[in-house]
Image (cartoon, rainbow, N blue to C red):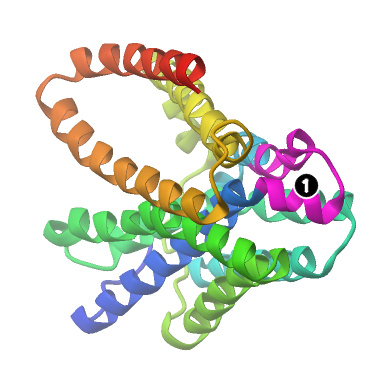
Amino acid sequence: MRQTNRLKPDSGALLVFILTAGVFGIINTEMGVIGILPLIAEHFHVTVPEAGWTVSIFALVVAISAPIMPLLFSGINRKKVMLLALGVFTLSNIISMLTSNFTLLLITRALPAFLHPVYVSMAFTVAAASVSKEKAPKAVAKVFIGVSAGMVLGVPVTSYIASEVSFTMGMMFFTVVNALVFVATILFIPSMPVKEKLSYGTQLNVLKKKIIWYSIIAVTLINGALFGFFSYMSDNLRTVTEVSYSVISVLLLIYGLANIIGNVIAGKQLATNPIRSMTFIPFALFTLYICIFILG
C-alpha cells in the first residue's frame, strides 16, 4: 500500500525522529509500570499480584487488538490516526497520574492499549515510506530504537523517579513524553492521506498461511514467558533478593541493555541458521528460569 509522497531528506529525518520518540513514549507507557509494581500496590492499597494487572490488562488488550485495529485504521489519514493515538495515551496518562481509584487506573491502562498496535505498526510503515527504497531498512531500524529504548531507558527511569520522588511523578514522565510527541506531530508532520487503499479481504489473505499462525503462537508463548518474568522482576528482587529500589533500577537497566544485545545477536544468528536458533531459544529460556527459581 502506498502511504505518502516521498518527503524531502531533512523532513524525512525529522519525521523518523518524531516517530521514534512516539514509539518510545508508547512502549514506555506500556512497560514503565513493570519496575514500580510494589509502589503501585502501596499507592492503591492492593496486593502486588493485583497491581500486576496494570501490565497484564495492557498486554492482553494489545494482543487482542493487534490483528484488528491496524486494519480498521488502514484507510485513514496517517497524521490524524497518530494524533488520535498520542492524544488518547496522553489523556489516559493524565488520569492515571491523578486518580486514587485502582479500577479507574486499570481502565486508563486498557483504553490506550487498543491504539498501541495502530501507532507502532504505522510508525514503521510511514518511516519506510518517507525515504527512498534503499534507505527504508535504515529508517525502520531507527524507529525500532524507540522500542528498545522504551525498555532500556523507560523502565529504569520510571522506577527511579517513582521510588525517589513519587508514583505520581513516575506517571507524569509517561504524560510528558507522549504530550511532547503529540505537539511535535501537530507542528512538524504533514498531512498523510492514504492514496491507495487495499480491501480488508486482500489484507487478511496473509492469515491463510499456516506459517503465520505458527509464528503468532510461538511469539505469544515466548513473549508471555519473557514479560511474565519481567513484570514481577522488581517485586522478586525486592522481596526475595532483598535489594533496594536504587539497585533495582540499575538491574532493570542492565536487563534492558541485555535485551538490545540479544536482538543484535539473534538477528545475526537468524540470518545464518534460523532453525537452530529457533530451537535453541526456548530451551535456553527454560534453563535460565529454572536456575532463577532454584537460586532465587
At x 20%, y 53%, the residue is 137
Residue 126 visible in the picture: yes
Q: Main secondary structure of the magenta part?
A: helix
- Quick one: 174 or 1, which is closer to the camera? 174
Q: Secondary structure at mark 1?
A: helix
- Quick one: 56 or 247, which is closer to the camera? 247
At x 26%, y 14%, the residue is 280
Q: Is residue 100 above or below residue 64?
A: below
Q: Which residue is mark 1?
A: 41
Left or right: residue 51 versus residue 123 is: right
Residue 101, percent from left and from top: 90, 56
Residue 185, percent from left and from top: 49, 79
Give the residue type that dot 1 points to: Ala
Left or right: residue 104 versus residue 281 is: right
At x 9%, y 24%, the residue is 272
- Quick one: 211 or 216, which is closer to the camera? 216
As for residue 155 lying within the magenta part, the answer is: no
Residue 176, percent from left and from top: 58, 76
Q: Range of the magenta residues?
A: 37-58
User: Could you say which quadrant of the image residue 271 lies in?
Assistant: top left
